Structure formats: C-alpha cells, structure tokens
Amino acid sequence: MSVFTRSRRAKVIGGIAMAGASALVLVGCSTGTPSDGETGGSAFEFPVDCDAAAPASYTPEYSSTSTGPASGLTYKIGTALPVTGNLAFLGPPEIAGTEYAASVVNEANKGITIDLIQGDSGDTDNKAYETEIPRILGEGATAVLGAASSGTSLQFIDQVIAAGAIQFSPANTSAAFTGYEDNGLYWRTAPSDVLQGEVLGNLIAGDGAETLGMLILNDSYGTGLACFAKAAFENAGGEVVSAALYNTGDTNFSSQVEDVLAADPDAIALITFEEVKTIIPELLGAEFPADKLYFVDGNLANFGDEFEEGSLEGAKGTYPAVDPATIEEFRNNLQAFWTGAGQPELKDFTYAPESFDAVILLALAALEAGSTAGPDVAAHLQQVSGGSGDGTKCTTYAECADIILGGGVADYDGVSGPITFNEVGDPTEASIGIFQYGADNNYSFLSVG
C-alpha cells in the first residue's frame, strides 16, 4: 500500500499569504488616516482594519493511504449553495453548474459515479447552514461544495473539516482562506480578492476618478475586497474619502449612503451583496451619476426591468471570469441542460463555470486516489489541476479519466480557466472580467482585467 504525503505552504509576500495568481500584483493595504485637508478639511478614518484582512501563513500536512486509481466508486458530494439569503441570485447558475458536471461525470461511466446532495447555505442572517450542513454530512457526503459567500463558508468550515470532509467553494474570494488552518481540506476555484481588488481599484482610477467612496458589507469578503481595492486605487494616485459599513440582515442604508455622499466622491464602489437593490435607488435619487458606480462579483447581476430603463447605464463592475466568447458553447450547453430539466432559464452565469469545474476536479482527484475519503481526495487535487507541473493537458472529465486510468497524470484545464492549484488550494491562474451596464440595466463584457 503506497502512502502519499504532501505539504501545502502558504507563500507570504509583503505580509500577505497569497495564492500567487498569474498577472496578480500584490499591493499593501494601508490603514493610515489621511491628514486634515485631504478630505476637504475633516479627517477621514477608513472603517476597516486592513492589517486584519491579511491571512496568516499555515502549512497543513497530511497523509493519504489511498492505493491509486479504482473503478466503481460512488462519490457523495453535498452542496451548500445560496438557495436563500443575500446571494440567492447566484444560486441558479452555481447549482446548475454542479448538476451539469455530475451528469457529465456519470454519463462518461469512467470509474466515478457522483451522488449529488443539494443543500442551501442561506446566509449569516437566516443561518440555513446550521441545519443543512449536519444533514449533508449525515447523509454521507465527504465533500461539501459551497458556500458562495465567504462569510457564510467561515461559519461552517470547522464543522466540515472536523468531519474529515473537503470543503470546496466555487465562489469564495476572501483572502482569509489562503492561510486558514484547514488540514488541507479547503479548496476553491475562485481566485482570492487580492486580484479582484487590484483590478477594481485600477479600473476606477483608470476611468479618471480621483476620489472614491465605498459602501461595504461588514464580513470577511466585503472588508477584504475593500482593502485591496483601496490599496490599488491609492497606489494609482487616488484617495478614498468616505466609506460606510453595514451588516448582513440590515434593510435600511440611508445613513450609510448619506455618509458616503457627504464627501462628494468622484466614484462609489458598491462592495455588497443583493442589498444593492435597496442601495441603488437611494444613490440615484440623490442624483449620483450611474456611470460613476462600480459593482463587484457579490452584486453584479442583470437587473433588467427591476429598475427604470437607463437607470444603470454606464455603471461598471468586476467578477472573476474569462471572456464569455470563449465559453459560449459551455453556456449554451448548460442552459439547454438546465431548461431541459424543467428549470427556469438562467439569467446570469456568474460562477457557473467555477461550480462545474469544482465537481470535475473532485471526481478526477477521487479517481486518481481510488478513494472518496476527504484527505485522500485532497491529496490529489493539486496534481489533477496541473499543480505538480508534470501532467498531460486535458479539458473534459472523460479525456482526463482515460489518462488517469491509463497510468498517466492528468492536468485538467477547465471552463473557468487553467486553475492550477498551488500548495494552499488557491488557483494560480485566473482572470477578472470587466463589465458595463447598458440602457436595459443588464451588463455586457468589456475586457479582462
């Protein structure tokens, strides 16, 4: 019986443990308070401790006693994706991505059968995860896919790890996970917000804004992304002149909007979840120009007729994504699969590719390990993603499975990108899409940041 031992070490650069994503430029997150006069005569103190947003370094070590490729394995994978809560608009594309991937694996009939157990993460307000995670683990899942919200994932990550199961998120972007003490069991196909913050801050500065206001969700995702965007914007010569926090479950944002607008910023970054639907009318009612608003992955959605035509025209946003033209076939196939299953047509595709790839990678790692136990699968995830650097490129489950069953090493390149996990379970190759709203209040792709 062979024993596979691997150590995963967080790389620390400039005090921040990070994944090292390609084309990622790390910037320091300043917590200094501007002097009087920098904000029109009154001192402004940024309401987030950006030093605390930097993750610690952690080196998990574990052993796998798996014996290698095996056929006839049934792999129970649970999902804790947002059916309810403030990210519920992301639920359909993510859930569709997992279902589609499971169908692809099962139809291939190459060693692994996925038994998908769907569940609801909810959010930190309704706390659906408190009953759903025990149910999913109790039904025998050895991997849990989710949550979408970083703050929600942090509510149950210790419970999943204690069960010896993998937690694999397609959408967590908080830098807090890079150095989390996870026994090597936490993975994600979404890149750290170090990258999105860099792109967002530079986008706003590049559009000509010299001062910036921020509305920020007060959780690990919101505060971390705000810090990275702030640092990038300031490094580009701009100044953050106002920022206001709110908590999950809040329904009135008038005071936060007033505080941010009081500094008369050139642009406003909305680092929020679905609460943005309440925030937008207040900003537009105060005659803040839509083309100076900037959205992020937590709220970039096709709003359509939810707002009066032209309300959001010119607003921009970012989220981890490749050029949609490169995955048009995937989107069409996913839409056909989802509607063919009797589900409503998908309005958004945010994190659908990452959800699909998460299931495929778990299946390939289980196949290579010859086991569905959490530590065994985790010990092979980096290798099947190409992280070992010696695999054969492949782009489908069937193609990769044939390589593994033939005794080779597969390097899966997914629909969300090459992925290529590093030692701490973060993808090292990722891109951030830049999008812009039209008169119909829906967004379209501009470029990759």
Image: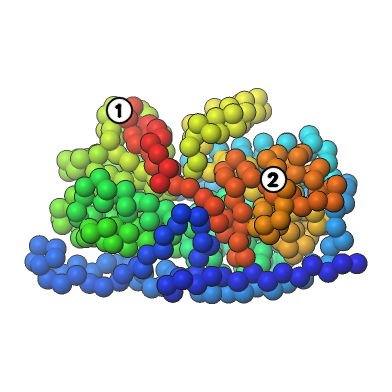
Tell me residue 208's x, y (percent): 21, 47
How many numbered circles does the render carry? 2
Tell me residue 131's x, y (percent): 63, 56
Image-quadrant location for residue 168: bottom right
Q: Label 2: few (<14), some or many (≥20) within 10 Å?
A: some
Tell me residue 147's x, y (percent): 56, 53
Tell me residue 41's x, y (percent): 8, 66
Q: Secondary structure at mark 1?
A: loop
The residue mark sitting in front, 2 or 1, is: 2
| Relative to 129, residue 103 above or below | above
Foreground of the two, 117 or 314: 314
Given the image, on which type of amino acid does mark 2 rest? Lys
Q: Label 1: few (<14), some or many (≥20) within 10 Å?
A: some
Work out whether residue 68 can be spotted.
yes
Foreground of the two, 388 or 442: 388
Foreground of the two, 308 or 85: 308
State how far apart marks 2 and 1 are (Cα): 42 Å
Foreground of the two, 289 or 357: 357
Q: Secondary structure at mark 2?
A: strand
Residue 439's mark? 1
Residue depicted at 28% across the width and 62% down the height: 235
Residue depicted at 72% across the width and 69% down the height: 6
| Relative to 54, residue 245 above or below | above
Residue depicted at 15% across the width and 53% down the height: 264
Q: Is residue 354 left or right of residue 282?
A: right
Image-quadrant location for residue 102: top right
Mark 2 or 1 closer to N-term? Answer: 2
Q: Is residue 93 left or right of residue 317?
A: right
Work out whether residue 343 can be spotted.
no
| Residue behind mark 2 | 393
